Image: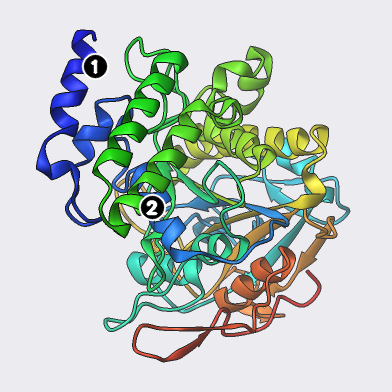
Amino acid sequence: MNSHDRELVSYLMEDRWIQDCEGWSRRNFLKIGLSGLLALSLPDLLQLKALAAPPEGRKRSVILLFMNGGPSHLDTFDPKPDAGAEYAGPLKAIPTKVDGVQICEALPRLAQRMDKAVLVRSMRSGENSHERAQHLLQTGYLPLASLEYPSYGAVIAKERGDDSVLPNYVAIGGRPEGIGPGFLSQAFAPFEVGNPAQPNFGLPDGSPAGNLSPERVSRRKAFLQALDTARRDNDRMEAMDTFYNKAFAIMESREARTAFEMSREPQPLREEYGMNPFGQACLLAVRLVEAGVDFVTVTLGGWDTHENNFTQLPNRLLPMMDLAMAALFDDLQRRGLFDSTLVVWTGEFGRTPRINNNANPGRDHWGNAWSVLMAGCGVEGGRVIGRTDERGAEVVESPVTPENLAATIYDKVGIDYKKYYETPSGRPIRLAASDPIPGV
C-alpha cells in the first residue's frame, strides 16, 4: 500500500466519515480527487437528487442568457433614433435581416440573424430593485419573506428527473437572485461552474486531482466499497454508498468529462464565440445541452450602467454579446440542436429612456419597459411582439410580464405551466402565475 492509500485509510477509519448529510466531512472524499469549486459540492448534489426521487423524462433544453444589472433596451434591441439626443444617445440603429426591424449598430452579427429570433419589445414589471426584479425574472414570482420560490432551472430539473450522469441544471458565470431551488430540495440547486475561458478548464468537482489516473480512482472506489460493506450497519451507510458510487461514476464517465473539456473544441470555433468568459460560457452551454443537460444559465454582468453606458456598451458588453450569441445560434444549428433548444436573452429590467446627467452619462433602472429575445425550440423567428412608445418609456402594444415569460419557458420545453407544487407549509403554488406569451 503506497502513501496515498495509507492516508486515505486513515481518513476513512475516522468516526467523522460516518455522519449524516448535514455533518459528514467532504474533505475525506476530496482526498480521492474531488475539487470544491461549488457552494454545493457534487456529492452533496447527487445524494440530495437521489433522495428527492424526481419523475422521469427528458425533453427539450433551455439556455438562459441573463444580463445581470439590466441592459438598456434603447441601446440594444429597441432603439429610438428619432427620440432626440437626450433619449436616443450616440449609438445608431442599423437594419436587420428582418424588413423594418432595427437594432443597435454594435450588434451587426445578431442583426443578420434576427430572422431566427422573436423579439419581445413589450416586457414590463414595474420593479426597479435588482434583487426583486432578478428573482422575478428567474422564477416568475416576486420574492416573499416567508417563501422562496424555485427557479425555472430547478423546476425543470425536478420534472425531468435524474436520468443522466450529468447534472440537470448548470449555472455559469454568476449567481443572480432567484436561481436556486427555493422551497424544493437542494437536490435541484444549480451545479455552478467557474470561468470556462481559463486554461485547462474541465469538469468541476469531478476530475481526478493531481496525477490520479482513472485506474487509481477505480482501485480506490473498490477499496471504499469494501470498507463500506464491512462497516454498514444502517440505511444511512447504504444511502451514502449509493451517492458515492454515483460520484465515482461521474469521475469515470467519459461523457461527463468530455462535456466540460473545452479544449476538445477546435480553436477557430472557440475564437468564433470570443476568447472571453461570456463567449466560452456560451460554447460550454452548447456542449452541455448536447450532452443532455436540461437547463443552463449563463450570466454576464456589468449592465448596471448608471455611468459610462456609452463606453461600456459599445466597447465591451455589446461586442462580446454579439460575437457569442451569433456563434451560439450558428453552432446550435450545425449540431442539430437549434430546434430542441430554447435560447432566452434577458435582463431583470430595462433602463431609463432619458440619459442621466452624471459626469460620465448613463441610464438608470427602468422596470416599465424592456426587451427579451427568444429563439429555437419551435419559436418562429423574424418577428417582433409588442411595442413601446416613441421614447421607449412605456409599453403601448401587447404588454408582456415575467409571469408570461415563465409560462412560455415551461410550455416550450413540454412542462405543464399550470401544474401546482405544494410548499412546505402546504400551500399550493402554480408553476407559472400567468399564460405563455401570445404568438411565441
Left or right: residue 87 versus residue 287 is: left
Q: Kindly identify the residue that appears in the image at 64 percent across and 75 percent down.
A: 407
- Depicted 253 relative to depicted 369: above or below: above
Q: Quadrant of residue 420?
A: bottom right
Which kind of residue does numbered mark 2 sit on?
A: Gln
SS for tag 1?
helix
Residue 157: in sight, yes or no?
A: yes
Q: Is residue 43 left or right of residue 279?
A: left
Give the camera-side residue of 155 and 407: 155
- Image coordinates of residue 26 in percent, x first then y, are 23, 40
For disc 2, the neighbor class at 10 Å (few under 14, some 14 to 19, many from 20) is many
Which one is earlier in the sequence, the residue at label 2 or at label 1? 1
Q: What residue does disc 2 label? A: 47
Q: Picture coordinates of residue 397 (x, y %)?
A: 71, 80
Mark seen at residue 5? 1
Number of other residues with Cα within 10 Å of mark 1, as a class: few under 14, some 14 to 19, many 20 or more: some
How far is disc 2 from disc 1 in space, using C-alphas? Answer: 25 Å
Q: Residue at x 39, y 57 (%)?
A: 48
Please name the colour scheme applied to the rendered image.
rainbow
Q: Is residue 108 visible?
A: no
In this figure, what is the number of numbered marks? 2
Check the picture and name the quadrant holding the N terminus: top left
Q: In the displayed structure, would residue 318 be above or below residue 383?
A: above
Q: Which circle, 2 or 1, is nearer the viewer? A: 1
The one of 153 and 297 positioned closer to us in this rendering: 153
Cβ–Cβ below 8 Å for labels 2 and 1?
Answer: no
Front one among 311 and 345: 345
Q: Residue furthest right?
A: 99
Residue at the farthest bottom position:
427
**Residue 19, position in %: x, y?**
18, 51
